[in-house]
Each structure stands twice: as C-alpha cells, then as structure tokens.
Image (cartoon, helix red, strand yellow):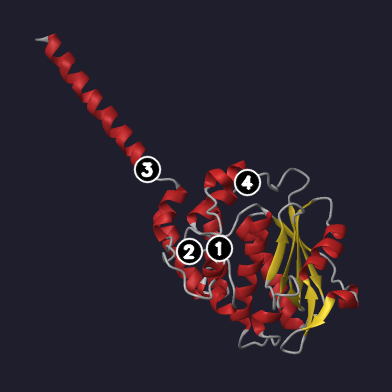
Amino acid sequence: MNQGKYNVTSLFFYAALFIFLFSCQKQKKSYFESTALNDIKLPASPKPGSWRYNHDEHFQTFEDFQKLKKIKPEPGKNTIYLQPIGTFDELQKREIALTKEYLKIYFQLEIKILPVLPNTIFPEKVKRISKEGHEQVLAGYVLDSILIKRKPKDAVVLMGITEKDLFPKPEWNYVFGLASYEEGVGVTSMYRFANGHLTDSNFNETFLRLIKISSHEIGHMFGISHCLNANCVMNGTNSLTETDHHLARACSLCQRKLNSSIHYDNKKRLLELKKFFEKQHLNTELTLANQDLNLVQ
C-alpha cells in the first residue's frame, strides 16, 4: 500500500471540504442583506411637489448614523410614552390604543399611554385659524412647553398625539408631525389623516397614516434621517398623497440603523408585524411582511 498516495488524497478531500464550507458560510446573507431584495428603490428624478423635489437632503449612510450622537434605550430609560392631548371620541381612542400596540411591535420596546391632557393647555398665543377655517396649534410649543416638561424619567421617548391640526412656523400651512432629536420628544396630529372626521369607513386608511407618521417621528428621535435609499416609512412627505404612497415598512438600511440601537430579534419582530397587519386587515403591509419572511425563513 502506498501510504503517501492516501495522505495526498486525504489532503485534497479535506481541502475541498474546507473550501465548500467556507464558500457556504461566505454566501450566507444577513437579515438586512436578504430583506434588501424587497426594497423598492426611489426614482432618480423626484416628482415636482414631492418632498425630495423641494428639499436637498444629505444621504445618511449607516456609518453616518453610527457616528451620530443620538438617543438610545438604556436600562431604566427604555420606555416609549404616548401623551394624548385633546378631546377624543371612541374611534380616536381606539386608534391610539392600536397605535400603542403597533409601536410596541415596531420598536420592540415597552409602550405606555399617559393620562389625556385637555386642549386648554394650549394658550391663545400659539393658536391660529388655518386658510381652511379651522384651529391650528404651533407644533414647537407642544414639544418645548408641554412634552419636555412632562417626560417621565424612565422614558427614552415621549410622543404626543393630538386631534388638533399643527403648523411648524407662520409660513407653513401645516405639518403632520414634528420631533426633537436631542430631547426625545415629538408630536403627531391626527387631524389631517381623516380631514377632521374619523369614521368607521375611513378608519383603516387614517389609522395607517397615523402609524406611519408616529413611527417616522419616533425614528427621527432615534437619530434616523429622512430616507433616500428606498420607498420607506422614513421618507419625507409633503402631502397625504405622498404619505399614502410611502410604505409603513422601513427599508433594510433604516431597519439596520434602528436595530443597531435597539438590539431586538429581527425575525421575531417581522412575525409580530405580520400578525398585526393580518389582524387589522392592512393587506399591502401584510404582503410586504410575507415577502420579507420568505427571504429570511
């Protein structure tokens, strides 16, 4: 028997096995690389009137995000609070309760709702009558004079929800929401999502708008800039039409940013989102969640 021959054969066998295993390991994609296949890229030329058309924003890479000084959950300061402000009917209360449920899944953090504050908390000097004839409230006042002062000690983020329409400065007609990166406070208005009239027939449409804007504003508080990567919940928006076009799904890049600050199980989150969308009959979002699940199973 030629021992040297068999030693050489064994050497080739183990070398081939090592290369095969290394190749398989190398080809295995991360969660974010896999779900990136479902990202819907933005058109190179934005439409006139859209957010991207009117705003020249910097593309925030993952490396940019990592270098940014930002708010992160930490032990003893890891709860998101919702602060309702106004007079809410039963459908609006249901929307807020479901928003709490959704945000708990989306951010994988504890969510608590604080007792409702009345509209009398807004002084006359921060109110105005809109061009359409209804009352609006200055969004910055809500952040600086209401929410910052009431932010609980264990809150990583405090999100106000009001049924009053908001405006950010005199020259702007309105704003859906506003947030402060540094203070970890934000506010979302429900008013425009239902044109001031929430009903059973428009409930799902307006609820979807509310969870998009709420998760968008809280995403800003965690340091994520407007997304220029793909159709994403973090895209900037100028109108309800644009909001409706944007997905509730965060693109793979924005998910990666969020997950680097909140170390949750991506697949668990995705499964919970799927169940939520199914339960609430949000069919487009359900389809997208299933498509992502198919890539990471």
Q: Residues within 10 Å of mark 4 (few under 14, many from 20)?
A: some
For marks 2 and 4, the one nearer the N-term is 4
Q: Secondary structure at mark 4?
A: helix
- In terms of depth relative to the viewer, which is nearer, 96 or 276? 96
Name the residue beneath numbered marker 4: 261
Amino acid on which disc 3 is placed: Lys
For marks 1 and 3, the one nearer the N-term is 3
Task: Determine whether label 2 and label 3 are within 8 Å by CB.
Answer: no
- Residue 5's disc is none
- Say whether residue 14 is visible: yes
Task: Determine whether label 1 and label 2 are within 8 Å by CB.
Answer: yes
Q: Secondary structure at mark 3?
A: loop
Question: Residue 261, how many percent across, how many down?
Answer: 62, 46
Depicted 110 relative to depicted 97: above or below: above
Distance between mark 2 and mark 3 Cα atoms: 21 Å
- In terms of depth relative to the viewer, which is nearer, 186 or 110? 186
Name the residue beneath numbered marker 2: 289
Name the residue beneath numbered marker 3: 28
Amino acid on which disc 4 is placed: Ser
- Residue at 68%, 44% (x, y): give it: 69
Distance between mark 4 and mark 3 Cα atoms: 24 Å
Amino acid on which disc 1 is placed: Leu
Numbered disc in front, either 4 or 3: 4
Question: Residue 118, how many percent across, how many down?
Answer: 88, 75
For marks 4 and 1, the one nearer the N-term is 4
Is residue 51 toward the left or the right of residue 181 in the image?
left
Name the residue beneath numbered marker 1: 273
Tell me the quarter of the picture where residue 276 sits.
bottom right
Amino acid on which disc 2 is placed: Ala
Question: How many numbered callouts?
Answer: 4
Q: Secondary structure at mark 2?
A: helix
For marks 2 and 3, the one nearer the N-term is 3
